[in-house]
């Protein structure tokens, strides 16, 4: 009945027989059906249906080795699922086939946490352990980025070699996999191999203050003062970390790190450290001869908003100007200037707040078009999960209906989910993209809102595992507290668990009415907005804080503490190099303020 309703809901010319597979019905479709781009029913079943549907098509002689226009076969898309992979291999699927871009099923599989069993299936079927794609990425590189030592061991046992220039070591350090790093170094990985932004493994260990990894790398001869493409040494990276572990900084100083080496803007590690606090790390840098002063911040607003509606009427037009500048300059959309503002404006719309509807429609069209370009990459787990998570959160807020794009986006997250239910970020862009708790919370929402109907049972299981993982975590800082609370709600955790998480977040509110990103930081609009959004309750003191701290042009200032990643550009939002996180903070503030207005009838 659900299948028929889905079909009758469409105009006759739009009916796609592959929708039957997406709804879990494989019996009535031609097993050898294919679209103009070469996508077969079997490929579509692998991605959108369960193992029973795949078995049905195979039993009716589906072509197991048919390739689409990009050279992908069903096996490329199946290797997130052990049963589907076994079914295809048993019918003669070619384990060594390469797509046009050089991607093999083994290269795909190796990037999934917990993939050792599937990797072994592919190796036993003749997959080449050293086959790289056109970008030079090998299965070892992918397994290292997944932080999966069992997969690395399986690849090495099959004859995999660390290729010259391999990024495996610095990639695995980004996900804090100590045993992976030890194994790679033992197998010949270069300790100072640079990544595509000039960073080394030591930079990445310093970012997260991972002392055991720092000790390992320094013991193996890592050069302590190498600078990345933005001029940052490992010490400069260590200076701007949420973790604030003096032991990490002390270790680098003991290894001879130059304490006054400046980054691209002439800032010393001490100046960078003072963005966070004037605590033990700053003291250690000064004791080692470090110089530098705290950066000058904008003066407080002299014209606060007089009401919630005034604040929203000032904030939304400014936010809507930031998006086009980003995608026109960079050729892609961003979380801070596109996905988050679009979601915030959608929340404002629900509450009857005015906005530029044509601009909002344009932003959605651009987002969908740009995301569609990387459909194959998402289907094979090659897209950074943080990006996918923000995109789906924004689309959910905009009430965007599930379609082939959201199927690909949610498949990317499903592919990258670890066996324990979590998703692991390999980013460190505080406060937005650094936390496994935050990423896993967004995944819970994605698995719930955009579950693929033909895999409904699987996605319910994924959401449940992610939620249970969140229940076990102890959040640090408001980003983790707020997103954990949201994830628990989205995943329908036990009421007592949700109440405890809300109480924990509520307790972090400061006397001035706001929240701070971390206990040692001052309050700001980012932390206050996300806290209010998560609590979803009346809080006049917090609303007053947001009104009081808004500038006359509709902006809020949030100081950047992120590690530089993207090239510099001006989005049009105020505050110079603080503009991106300020725009993100404004988006959270708009969501919180909009909810203080009665919904539109």
Image (spheres, rainbow, N blue to C red):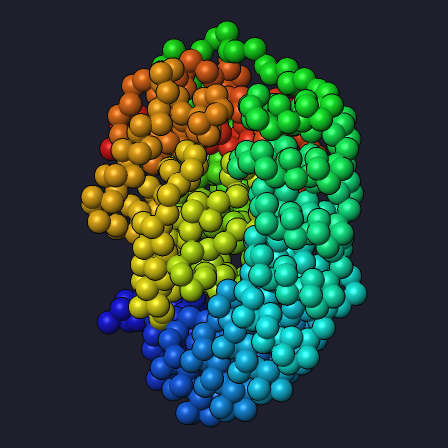
- One can see residue 126 in this view: yes
Q: Residue drawn 66% across and 77% down?
A: 129
Residue 75 vs residue 221, the one in the foreground: 221
Is residue 51 placed above or below 312 in the rendered structure? below
In percent of width and height, residue 552 lies at: 51, 13
Instruction: Name the quarter where the N terminus is drawn.
Output: bottom left
In percent of width and height, residue 137 lies at: 69, 65
Q: Quadrant of residue 156?
A: bottom right
Q: Is residue 137 left or right of residue 12?
A: right
Q: Residue drawn 63% across and 32% down?
A: 239
Residue 315 vs residue 300, the one in the foreground: 300
Residue 375 vs residue 383, the one in the foreground: 383
The residue at the far left in this view is 495
Q: Is residue 522 left or right of residue 506?
A: right
In percent of width and height, residue 164 lies at: 79, 65
In percent of width and height, residue 335 lies at: 54, 41
Is residue 578 placed above or below 173 in the rendered structure? above
């Amino acid at each position: 009945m659900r299948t028929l309703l889905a079909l009758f809901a469409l105009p006759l010319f739009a009916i796609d027989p592959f929708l039957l597979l997406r709804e879990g019905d494989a019996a009535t479709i031609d097993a050898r059906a294919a679209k103009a781009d070469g996508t077969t029913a079997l490929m579509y079943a692998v991605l959108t249906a369960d193992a029973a549907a795949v078995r049905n098509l195979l039993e009716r002689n589906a072509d197991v080795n048919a390739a689409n226009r990009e050279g992908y076969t069903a096996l490329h898309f199946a290797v997130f699922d052990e049963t589907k992979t076994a079914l295809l291999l048993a019918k003669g699927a070619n384990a060594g086939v390469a797509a046009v871009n050089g991607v093999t099923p083994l290269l795909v599989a190796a990037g999934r946490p917990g993939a050792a069993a599937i990797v072994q299936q592919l190796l036993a079927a003749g997959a080449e352990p050293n086959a790289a794609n056109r970008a030079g990425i090998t299965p070892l590189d992918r397994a290292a980025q997944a932080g999966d030592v069992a997969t690395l061991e399986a690849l090495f046992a099959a004859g995999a070699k660390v290729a010259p220039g391999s990024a495996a070591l610095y990639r695995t350090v980004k996900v804090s996999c100590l045993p992976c790093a030890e194994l790679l170094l033992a197998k010949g990985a270069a300790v100072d191999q640079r990544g595509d932004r000039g960073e080394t493994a030591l930079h990445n260990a310093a970012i997260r203050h991972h002392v055991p990894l720092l000790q390992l790398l320094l013991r193996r001869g890592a050069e302590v003062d190498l600078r990345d493409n933005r001029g940052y040494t490992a010490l400069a990276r260590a200076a701007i970390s949420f973790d604030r572990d003096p032991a990490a900084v002390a270790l680098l100083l003991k290894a001879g790190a130059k304490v006054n080496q400046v980054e691209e803007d002439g800032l010393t590690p001490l100046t960078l450290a003072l963005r966070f606090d004037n605590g033990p790390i700053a003291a250690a840098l000064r004791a080692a001869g470090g110089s530098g002063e705290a950066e000058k911040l904008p003066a407080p607003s002299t014209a606060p908003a007089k009401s919630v509606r005034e604040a929203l009427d000032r904030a939304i037009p400014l936010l809507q100007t930031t998006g086009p500048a980003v995608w026109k300059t960079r050729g892609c959309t961003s979380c801070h200037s596109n996905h988050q503002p679009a979601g915030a404006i959608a929340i404002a719309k629900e509450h009857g707040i005015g906005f530029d509807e044509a601009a909002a429609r344009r932003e959605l069209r651009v987002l969908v078009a740009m995301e569609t370009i990387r459909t194959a990459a998402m289907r094979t787990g090659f897209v950074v999960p943080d990006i996918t998570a923000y995109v789906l959160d924004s689309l959910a807020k905009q009430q965007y209906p599930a379609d082939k794009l959201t199927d690909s986006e949610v498949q990317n997250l499903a592919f990258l989910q670890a066996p324990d239910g979590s998703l692991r970020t390999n980013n460190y862009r505080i406060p937005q993209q650094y936390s496994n708790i935050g990423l896993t919370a967004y995944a819970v929402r994605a698995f719930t809102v955009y579950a693929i109907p033909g895999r409904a049972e699987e996605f319910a299981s994924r959401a449940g595992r992610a939620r249970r993982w969140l229940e076990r975590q102890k959040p640090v800082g408001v980003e983790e507290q707020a997103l954990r609370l949201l994830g628990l709600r989205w995943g329908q955790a036990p009421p007592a668990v949700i109440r405890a998480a809300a109480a924990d977040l509520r307790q972090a509110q400061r006397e001035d009415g706001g929240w701070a990103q971390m206990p040692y930081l001052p309050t700001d609009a980012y932390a206050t907005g996300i806290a209010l959004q998560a609590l979803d309750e009346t809080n006049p003191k917090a609303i007053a804080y947001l009104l009081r701290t808004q500038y006359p042009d509709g902006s809020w200032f949030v100081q950047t503490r992120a590690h530089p990643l993207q090239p510099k550009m001006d989005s049009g939002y105020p505050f110079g190099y603080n503009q991106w996180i300020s725009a993100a903070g404004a988006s959270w503030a708009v969501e919180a303020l909009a909810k203080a207005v009665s919904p539109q009838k």
